[in-house]
Amino acid sequence: MVAGAGFARDRRGPKAGGYGDQTRALLWLRFTLSLRRIARRREWGRLVLSILSVLLALAVSCGVAAAVWGKAVELQHAPGRVEARGGAAKLAAIQSLRATGKAVSPALAKSVSLHLEGKRKEALRELNTAIENGEETPEVFAAKGHIQFGVTGTGGGFFTCGVE
């Protein structure tokens, strides 16, 4: 690191006026200069438009956050609705399909769900069944190795994941 890059010369910690202070100062300078330009040129329409755009962005962000929060609370109080949709594992698989365009193995999704619930041995059994049924994908083996490492506490999962 260079002494002028936000750290003291002895490199033990940030110098006075570190990155946070510099960022705050630059943002305040930008704000002040914009206000001066608007006042000098009498561009009050620009000021009103800027304020309205900031308020609109804030309203949209708060609306989306409120909608997500409301749905989460609704599903928290009605876990039967999650199960009616196929459970958390199926919902995770659907979300992954939407995000990546690739289908996720139902066994992998169920295994992840079991692992998150703390049922590691059941998750491992689910992955072993998937491998026996021909689902020999890198994701399944990676999940098996990860869970096996957590169950046994050793790195011995390498030789039992189909990599011999």
Image (tube, grey):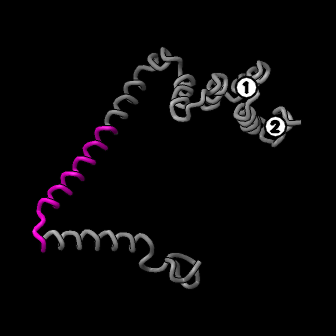
Identify the disc placed on residue 157: 2
Where residue 107 appears, as percent x and y from the top left, is 67, 23
Few, some or many residues within 10 Å of mark 1 (<14, 14–19, 20+):
many
**Who is closer to the viewer here, 33 or 77?**
33
151 lies above or below 16 = above
In the rendered image, which quarter is residue 24 located in? bottom left
Which comes sooner in the sequence, label 1 or label 2? 1
Where residue 154 appears, as percent x and y from the top left, is 81, 42
Which residue appears at 71% of the width and 22% of the height?
Answer: 126
Q: Quadrant of the C terminus?
A: top right
The residue under label 1 is 127
The residue segment tinted magenta is 40-64
Which residue appears at 37% of the width and 28% of the height?
Answer: 71
Element type at mark 1: helix
**Who is closer to the viewer here, 38 or 22?**
38
103 lies above or below 55 = above
In magenta segment, residue 19: no
